[in-house]
Image (spheres, rainbow, N blue to C red):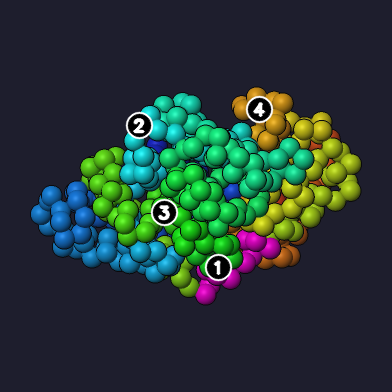
């Protein structure tokens, strides 16, 4: 019964280093968040020991009476939170959820229509090296070159020309909301099923700060760890008519035994997501993103050839366009990393640069909102980023790093979590 630090000091040291990094820097990767201690406790629990293939009440293993309670809680909370008829909480991650969705909705060789990866779509929406691009025919829609916004007339034209079996609405890098009702009517017109992947904006949907896809889509998939703020994992919601096919696509279709410790953590996360405190946090997420978009549109930044795609944001992230800047995406990411702010470089639509060194940055606010940031702190971090990007390679790294350190100290993270034994 040695502790982690005693048994495996190398891993313990790396984990302590990561805790230190999370505390000392400002996390602005749009897909990341900080889970509460209760979620860490659920995930680091004895539930990791239990095999529970099947579903509550219909397992292929004995001794599932307690994990059945946990999975039922997760399912019921997911349904209540999003107003869905059906929930499957077993997908290990977003990609597994998406594989199961496609398996349930279509056959290999049939055609899907999703958002182009280079315009903000996700790998699982038809990228050629992903299962979705290998098993299915793929057609894609993108954003307009003049506005960088999805134009539903173009989506409709594509759908009519391509006649896909499944239409996907959802994204990993897009700063605006999609029109789910318009997607539904196009899907109906061409006889396709509509799948919405709300992985990025699920936390906003849960709190009514983003339109819900649930009434419109046949199936909705999500991750639990982005705006939703829970454990790294996936989940599927759907109309009841899809329940049987989806359950069978998750298990035994895509997975074996469910990760019951992760499912317990999902249940906890969904309980939190229904709270007033969570709703207030999501409001700060949105307000912070707007503050950031405004600062990055200011004259000193714009004068250096930097702009914000679509001119702003309706969600938790901002896409910075560096196509006319002296910085490329890698240099922008590295510069912010040097001053203690973590973001990721990202392709912009119609990017002339290659994916490994694209012309954009994706910057998100969920993790900092979880840390407690409100308008004032977001104004300060937006100014730090704006000042850094405007100055480019001549930025005063030490001064900017000092401002980041001050913010990190003013908004401490995981207080009391000095030792992994506390988890
Ligand atoms: N769907 C979307 C829209 C995403 O952005 C992501 C994650 O980046 C996923 C699915 C996949 O989630 P995971 O990384 O948990 O497999």
Q: Are marks 3 and 1 in contact (CB under 8 Å)?
A: no
- Mark toward the start of the polypeptide (3 vs 1): 1
The Cα atoms of the two marked residues, 4 and 3, are separated by: 37 Å
Task: Indicate which label's residue lies in the foreground, 3 or 1.
Answer: 3
Sequence order check, earlier mark of 2 and 4: 2
Name which of mark 4 and mark 3 comes first in the sequence.
3
**Overall secondary structure of the magenta section:** helix
Q: In the rendering, which numbered label is found on residue 208?
A: 1
414 vs 352, left or right, is: left
**Which residue carries the number 2 mark?**
108
Name the residue that disc number 4 marks.
357
Quarter the C terminus occupies: bottom left
- Cα separation, mark 1 vs mark 4, equals 36 Å
Of marks 1 and 4, the one in the foreground: 1
Residue 165 vertical placement versus 235 (above, below): above
Q: Does the magenta stretch include residue 283?
A: yes
Image location (x, y in percent) of residue 92: 35, 46
Nearest to viewer (mark 2 / mark 1)? 2
Q: Give the range drawn in magenta.
A: 276-287
Q: Give the secondary structure at mark 2.
A: loop
- Mark toward the viewer: 4 or 3: 3
Residue at which label 3 appears: 218
Badge 1 local density, few (<14 within 10 Å), some, or many (20+)? few
12 over 279 or under it: above or below: above
């Amino acid at each position: 019964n040695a502790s982690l630090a005693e048994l495996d000091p190398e891993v313990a040291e790396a984990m302590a280093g990561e805790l230190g990094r999370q505390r000392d820097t400002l996390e602005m990767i749009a897909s990341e968040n900080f889970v509460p201690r209760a979620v860490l406790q659920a995930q680091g629990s004895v539930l990791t020991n239990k095999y529970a293939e099947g579903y509550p009440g219909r397992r292929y293993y004995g001794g599932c009476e307690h994990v059945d309670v946990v999975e039922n809680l997760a399912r019921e909370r997911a349904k209540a939170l999003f107003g869905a008829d059906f929930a499957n909480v077993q997908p290990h991650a977003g990609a597994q959820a998406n594989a199961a969705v496609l398996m349930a909705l279509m056959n290999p060789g049939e055609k899907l229509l999703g958002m182009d990866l280079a315009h903000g779509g996700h790998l699982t929406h038809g990228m050629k090296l992903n299962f979705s691009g290998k098993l299915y025919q793929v057609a894609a829609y993108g954003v307009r070159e003049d506005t960088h916004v999805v134009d539903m007339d173009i989506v409709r034209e594509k759908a009519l020309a391509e006649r896909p079996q499944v239409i996907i609405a959802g994204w990993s890098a897009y700063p605006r909301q999609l029109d789910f009702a318009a997607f539904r009517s196009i899907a109906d017109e061409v006889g396709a099923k509509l799948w919405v992947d709300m992985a990025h904006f699920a936390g906003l949907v849960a709190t009514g700060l983003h339109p819900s896809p649930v009434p419109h889509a046949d199936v909705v998939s999500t991750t639990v760890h982005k705006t939703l703020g829970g454990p790294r994992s996936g989940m599927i919601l759907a109309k009841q008519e899809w329940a049987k096919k989806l359950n069978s696509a998750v298990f035994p279709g895509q997975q074996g035994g469910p990760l019951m410790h992760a499912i317990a953590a999902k249940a906890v996360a969904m309980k939190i997501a229904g709270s007033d405190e969570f709703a207030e946090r999501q409001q700060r997420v949105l307000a912070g993103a707007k503050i950031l978009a405004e600062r990055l549109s200011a004259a000193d930044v714009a004068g250096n050839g930097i702009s914000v795609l679509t001119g702003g944001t309706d969600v938790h992230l901002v896409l910075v366009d560096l196509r006319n800047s002296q910085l490329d995406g890698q240099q922008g990411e590295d510069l912010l990393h040097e001053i203690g702010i973590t973001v990721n470089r990202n392709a912009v639509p119609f990017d002339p640069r290659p994916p490994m060194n694209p012309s954009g940055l994706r910057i998100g606010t969920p993790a900092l909102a979880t840390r407690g940031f409100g308008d004032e702190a977001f104004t300060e971090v937006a100014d730090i980023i704006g000042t850094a990007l405007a100055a480019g390679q001549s930025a005063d790294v030490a001064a900017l790093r000092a401002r980041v350190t001050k913010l990190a100290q003013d908004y401490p993270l995981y207080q009391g979590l000095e030792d992994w034994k506390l988890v």
